[in-house]
Image: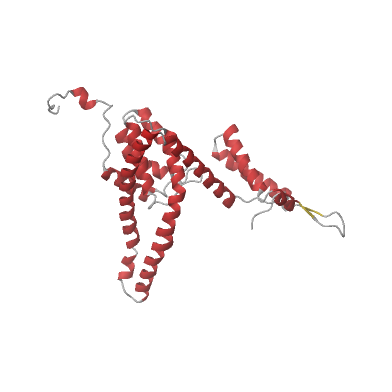
Amino acid sequence: MAELNKGQTAETITSPNQTPKITEKDVKNSWLLYYLVAEMGISYERLQALGFTVSLLPILRKLYKTKNDLKDAIKRHLVFYNTEAVFVSLINGIVISMEEQKAHGEDVTSEAITGVKTGLMGPLAGIGDSIDWATLKPIIFALAATLSASGNPIGAFVLLLLPIVQVIVGRTLAGIGYKAGRESITEMLASGRIQQLITGAKTMGLFMMGALSSTYIAVKTPIKINFGSGNTTFVLQKVFDSIAPGLLSLAVVMFIYWWLNKRSQNLSIVVLLIVAIALLGAFTGFLAPLS
């Protein structure tokens, strides 16, 4: 057994209440793991949630010593999460900071942690996509293509600039997010603004989910009724559009929400039900295939 320091007992060494301190190196390495595995194990139900959770496991195991606490921490990070992996490293740092505060007994709720992730993943992803993928990547790839086309072998290695820059930026922002998150969480807890943060993050998340729903869900009906020659053809879709554009799409979204909230949380059942309704609608002519 290791020699005890003065005033130290075996009980103080092994006490589960002594939460180890998270270092900036831990934070940066956690983000680097997320950068490598973000797109692995991806699914329509959770998207990047599995990769994000895996990247946090070394941190969570360090913070939570009981099985139930660790299980609860893992479960709260397995909810839907989808964003850009580089500039959103700020979220990684902030979330680790909040988890550390929670592990130390501060009044940081699971809803607050999830709300911060949900509220920030959209806006920061927009920034990251614009700078990282829409600006930096085309410039580097164009330079590599130009050098390669002229027979310069350096062109093949220029492509490595993109991941190098991404790793440098991501690790730096993860550390900044951790430091800023730790200080801001302490301040918010003292000022009582944590509830405002939760409400704002949830509201932003709802707007984002609404925008995604209106963008990716499109349902139309091809039903037309002709009441005789000389009469205007009755187009059912025009009636729906006159009430509210995208009314059928909204009805589908609300039906799925109702089903998940009242009937079942099984996404596989919902997917099979949607496929069955789509096939039935196509065969009966009530729903039109999208072009």
Is residue 78 something one can see in this rendering?
no
* Residue at 34% across, 44% down: 93
- Residue 120 shown left or right of residue 290 in the figure: left
- Image height of 144 relative to 196, above or below: below
Q: Residue furthest right?
A: 229
Identify the colour scheme used. Answer: secondary structure
- Residue 134: x percent and y percent? 44, 61
Is residue 157 something one can see in this rendering?
yes
> Quadrant location of residue 17?
top left
Q: Nearer the viewer, residue 69 or 109?
A: 109
- Residue 133: x percent and y percent? 42, 59
Q: Residue furthest bottom?
A: 150
- Residue 281: x percent and y percent? 69, 47
* Location of the N terminus (image quadrant): top left
* Location of the C terminus (image quadrant): bottom right
* Residue at 34% across, 46% down: 177
* Residue at 31% across, 58% down: 164
Instruction: State how many labels appear.
Output: 0
- Residue 125: x percent and y percent? 44, 52
Q: Nearer the viewer, residue 111 or 84?
A: 111
- Residue 156 shown left or right of residue 77 in the figure: left
* Residue at 85% across, 54% down: 227
Q: Residue furthest front?
A: 191
